[in-house]
Image (cartoon, grey):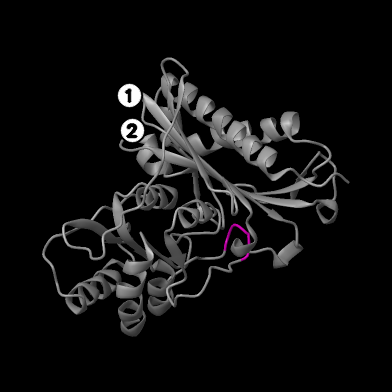
Amino acid sequence: MMHPNLDQARRLLCRLQDAIRDSVRAAQSRGARRMTRVAAVTTADTIYGIDKVSEHAVLAWFAKNWPERWPVELVMEGLEQETAFPRGTPVEKTIFKCILDPIDGTRGLMYDKRSAWSLAALAPQRGTKTHLGDIVVAAMTELPTSKGGFADQLSVVRGRGVRAERLDLRTGRRTKFAPRPSRATDLAHGFASFAKFFPPGKVWLAEREARLWRALGNSPHIFDDQYLSTGGQLYELALGHDRFIADLRPLAFAKLGLGAALACHPYDICTALIAQELGCIVTAPDGKPLRVPLDTTSPVAWVGYANKALARKIGPTLRRLL
């Protein structure tokens, strides 16, 4: 079997996400009613009409475009059964595991509030032992609101740097740009957030957040931004907009005896490699590397720092408080 060309694999993920973006744009032009209806409720998440649009685009794209010489297992939000390409390939015969979230940030996009993101990553196939730390290729593509004129796309092969392009949706012109995380050494006058999107766990999370700010000096100028998309949060870190993000929902839900359906899952955080290649620090809350299996149900608690200096300053205090 031919050894995979990882840069070609990166380009394939970008092309896949181009197709997803185009299908979503077409759905937006047809109106919001179908996009906002609940289409299904799975063990992983609630699936809306807009998710079904992207799911069909993904399956059709893989069937038509994925190279036969690189058999791949597909792990995706909304896909309940084992699926491999080329069709009919036994999962145990695949060489890649591809985990993806066609639309991360569905709620914000389907109400035309804020860009969502299409996320995808590849790891060498190790069966159920394959985890987030095995990912070697990742891509994320912006799914803008209906009035958005541009869409960013970031992609990476581990150890080879990040490629970033901005697409003009009117002309089709692509322009390269260089993402740059913040180099600030404190949080004053910057954005730093604990993810607390839903009523369950919000009080527990807000209490920990307040304790951390007090322990760090309690600057009144720390701004909160609840971007309802893990991919979007990673993008904000990568581009220097945010300095620190903590998503501790699984810890809160476990402490309160709640389910994990409203937590981050592996497909939400699968593009962390992009931020890491740019110098951001993305870890588990205890500072250890993320080693969660590439599935659709495992809850993921994570923290992201824009740079090493912030990780050294905030990390030990956060771990002590937890």
Q: Main secondary structure of the magenta part?
A: loop
Residue 27, position in %: x, y? 47, 25
Residue type (three-letter) at the residue carrying disc 2: Asp
Residue type (three-letter) at the residue carrying disc 1: Lys
Mark 1, other Cα within 10 Å: few <14 / some 14–19 / many ≥20: few
Residue 44 against residue 51 in the figure, above or below: below
* Label 1: element kind: loop
Q: Earlier in the sequence, mark 1 or mark 2?
A: 2
| Image-based side of 162 in relation to 178, left or right | right
The residue that disc 1 covers is 147
Residue 100, position in %: x, y? 59, 47
Q: Quadrant of the C terminus?
A: bottom left
Q: Tell me if I can see residue 5 in this picture.
A: yes
Report the number of numbered marks: 2
Give the Cα separation between the discs numbered 1 and 2: 9 Å
Q: Which residue is at the front of the view, 203 or 9? A: 9
Q: Is residue 137 magenta?
A: no
Residue 103 against residue 223 in the figure, above or below: above
Q: Which residue is at the front of the view, 264 or 214? A: 214
Residue 62, position in %: x, y? 71, 35
The residue sitting at 81% across, 53% down in the picture is: 91
Which residue occupies the extreme right position in the image? 1
The residue that disc 2 covers is 112
The residue sitting at 49% across, 21% down in the picture is: 26
The residue sitting at 36% across, 30% down in the picture is: 145
- Label 1–label 2 contact, CB within 8 A: yes
* Magenta extent: 293-297
